[in-house]
Image (spheres, grey):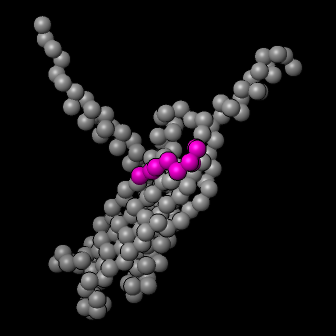
Amino acid sequence: MSEQDGQARQAGPEAQAEFSLQRIYIKDVSFESPRSPEAFVGQWKPMVNLDLNSHHKVVGTDLFEVVLSVTVTVKKEDGEVVYLSEVQQAGIFMIRGMNAEGFAQTLGSFCPSVLFPYAREAIDGLVIKGSFPPLMLAPVNFDAIFAHSRQQQAGAENSSAPPPLVN
């Protein structure tokens, strides 16, 4: 083994990105059914609106809490809310050794992708306990949402920049 190989091995583990899930938990949960019991009578043709949001904060050295907020609002054809279900699914993740873009991608896309199946299960359980048909939320492409968010941020930064000075 050459001296360069030994130096590369010593530097390798420090330069490698590390990621691990420490804990997953529900931070907040809510279910409202303002039209019960009337909602159970008549034909069921729901209009479903899904709202997703995520945020994160530092909770320790290389530890980050990521919270995925999922709100499902179901309305009847007349526009009245049948039920509203909200879950804030959270996780604590250890992340270190990533460049800025990888770090942002991990917090903004990968972590919410890990949390979503848990939030989907919690929402489905709430809906069933509310005596409504199961609500099987489709998978979500958090990579596409993250990319779109980055494009919007870049566009906002470009549009808020002062116009160039002309001499």
Determine whether, in the image, residue 116 is placed left or right of residue 83: right
* Residue closer to the observer: 4 or 22: 22
Q: In the picture shown, does residue 52 fall above or below 105?
A: below
Using the image, determine if residue 130 lies above or below residue 112. below
Residue drawn at (37%, 70%), measured in percent from left and top?
Answer: 86
Q: In which quarter of the image is the N terminus?
A: top right
Q: Position of residue 66 (x, y in %)?
A: 48, 54
Query: Which segment is the magenta one?
Result: 55-63
For the stretch drawn in magenta, the main secondary structure is: strand
> In which quadrant of the rendered view does residue 47 lie?
bottom left
Residue 89 position within the rendered picture, expressed as x and y whole percent measured from the top left:
47, 63
Residue 45 seen: no
Q: Position of residue 33 (x, y in %)?
A: 31, 82
Q: Does the magenta stretch include residue 133?
A: no
Taking the spot 64% from the left edge, 41% from the top edge, the residue there is 18
Quarter-of-image position of residue 167: top left
How many numbered discs? 0
* 20 relative to 90 in the view: left or right: right
Q: Which residue is drawn at 21% across and 31% down?
A: 160
Q: In this view, does 165 lie above or below 47?
A: above
Q: Which residue is depicted at the point 48% across and 34% down?
A: 101
Q: In which quarter of the image is residue 9?
A: top right
> Percent x, y for residue 70?
39, 64
Instruction: Look at the image and tell me whether residue 72 can be seen.
Output: yes
Q: Is residue 53 left or right of residue 75?
A: right
Q: Residue furthest right?
A: 1
Towards the viewer: 26 or 52: 26
